[in-house]
Image: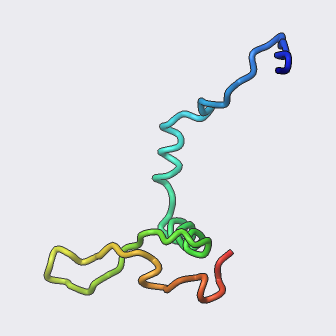
Amino acid sequence: MGKKRSRSKKVSAGVHSNVSAGTLRMLRQNRTPGERLAFKLEAWRRGKNPWMSVDTGATGSNTRFKRVRMNEVYGDPKKMGLSV
């Protein structure tokens, strides 16, 4: 068995973030709808299959939008040759 090394200082485990949770939350909330769609399209191209909202066209009911997977709307990017 090898001998343990002795250190003069403690090495960080990298567990804690150096940015406050409020700042990260504010950055996420201030994204435009275009940025959100761009992130989802990039994830879809990488084969992640994220959720998206689709307009059903039902104006009189309370279910105007429906949540579906992007593979149901755009198809599988691997079969189209678009995956990264």
Residue ID at (24%, 78%) = 64
Give the residue furthest to the bottom: 80
In this picture, residue 37 sits left or right of residue 80: left
**Numbered label tally:** 0
Question: At which x and y percent is residue 75?
Answer: 49, 86
In this picture, residue 58 sits left or right of residue 38: left
Which quadrant would residue 53 be assigned to in this image?
Answer: bottom left
Residue ID at (26%, 86%) = 57
Above or below residue 23? Residue 53 is below
Question: At which x and y percent is residue 24?
Answer: 53, 43
User: 28 or 53, which lies in front?
Assistant: 53
Which quadrant would residue 56 be assigned to in this image?
Answer: bottom left
User: 70 or 78, which lies in front?
Assistant: 78
The scheme the figure's colours follow is rainbow
Question: At which x and y percent is residue 23?
Answer: 53, 40
Give the residue furthest to the front: 1
| Quarter of the image with the N terminus in it | top right
